[in-house]
Image (cartoon, rainbow, N blue to C red):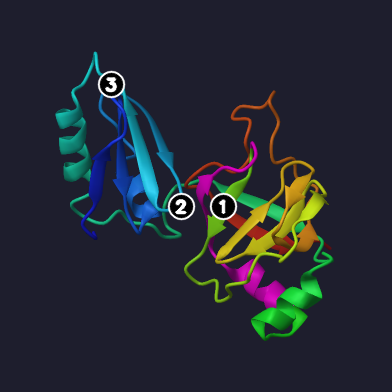
């Protein structure tokens, strides 16, 4: 695994800087007693701990031990799979395909074939940033974000895909919509897309 940079983040957390958040997050799946939370982001993993139960040095040693060998991230793992049915009729579908330099049907097919995984969550409750090694397109955000993106919108930006869990402003390119409920505070867990989960998109019939 690429060498990590680990920095103190206040008195009860360490910030792991890494170009491979998915692998590091997977490697830290079994924390020792005293580690209270592990939060992945775009290029970091935050490891929170209770300093009355474990020392920063012990947490750092656990991180180092756990990440010596690359974690296995592939389709054979036991991470949950979330399948989302999509109507590919978004207002930016034609423009996104043109920007990618492919026909619309190719963009849709690539989106369905990609082996998406939730790298991290943020922006709004239930919004997962999805990445896939076999996703070949990198599309820009809109120059002028929309003031309101409809709930369930399936979107693309940079190398990510995502689904808006509620109606919010947003600047990603909208290629479709799903009827799935991405966030329900009465569900356990409330978010349908959690870090590490695999996601498959299929065209709604």
List x then y, in percent, for residue 186. Answer: 69, 23
Q: Are marks 2 and 1 in contact (CB under 8 Å)?
A: yes
* Above or below, comparing residue 51 to residue 112 in the picture: above
Q: Which mark is residue 42?
A: 2
Q: Which mark is residue 196?
A: none
| Separation of residues labelled 3 and 2 (CA atoms) | 25 Å
N-terminal of the pair, mark 3 or mark 2, is: 3
List x then y, in percent, for residue 194. Answer: 54, 41
Q: Mark 2 Cα within 10 Å, few/some/many (few <14, many 20+)?
A: some
> Residue at image x 35%, y 53%?
23
Q: Secondary structure at mark 1?
A: strand
Q: Magenta segment, which residues?
A: 105-125
In this view, the residue farthest toward the top is 52
Q: Which mark is residue 34?
A: 3
Residue that label 1 marks: 129
Residue 116 lies in magenta, yes or no? yes
**Residue closest to the eye, 84 or 68:** 68
| Separation of residues labelled 1 and 3 (CA atoms) | 28 Å
Q: Mark 3 Cα within 10 Å, few/some/many (few <14, many 20+)?
A: some
Q: Mark 1 Cα within 10 Å, few/some/many (few <14, many 20+)?
A: many
């Amino acid at each position: 695994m690429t060498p990590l940079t680990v920095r103190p983040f206040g008195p009860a957390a360490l910030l792991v800087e890494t170009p491979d958040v998915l692998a590091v997050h997977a490697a830290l799946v079994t924390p020792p007693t005293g580690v209270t939370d592990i939060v992945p982001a775009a290029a970091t993993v935050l490891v929170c701990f209770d300093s009355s139960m474990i020392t920063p040095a012990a947490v750092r040693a656990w991180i180092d031990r756990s990440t010596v060998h690359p974690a296995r991230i592939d389709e054979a793992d036991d991470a949950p799979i979330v399948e989302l049915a999509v109507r590919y009729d978004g207002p930016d579908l034609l423009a996104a395909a043109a920007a990618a330099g492919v026909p619309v049907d190719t963009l849709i097919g690539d989106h369905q074939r990609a082996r998406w995984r939730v790298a991290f969550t943020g922006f709004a409750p239930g919004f997962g940033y999805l990445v896939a090694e076999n996703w070949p397109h990198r599309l820009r955000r809109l120059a002028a974000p929309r003031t309101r993106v409809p709930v369930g919108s399936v979107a693309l930006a940079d190398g990510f895909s995502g689904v808006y869990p509620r109606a919010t402003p947003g600047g990603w390119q909208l290629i479709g919509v799903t009827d799935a409920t991405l966030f329900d505070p009465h569900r356990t867990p409330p978010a349908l897309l959690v870090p590490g989960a695999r996601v498959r998109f299929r065209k709604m019939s």
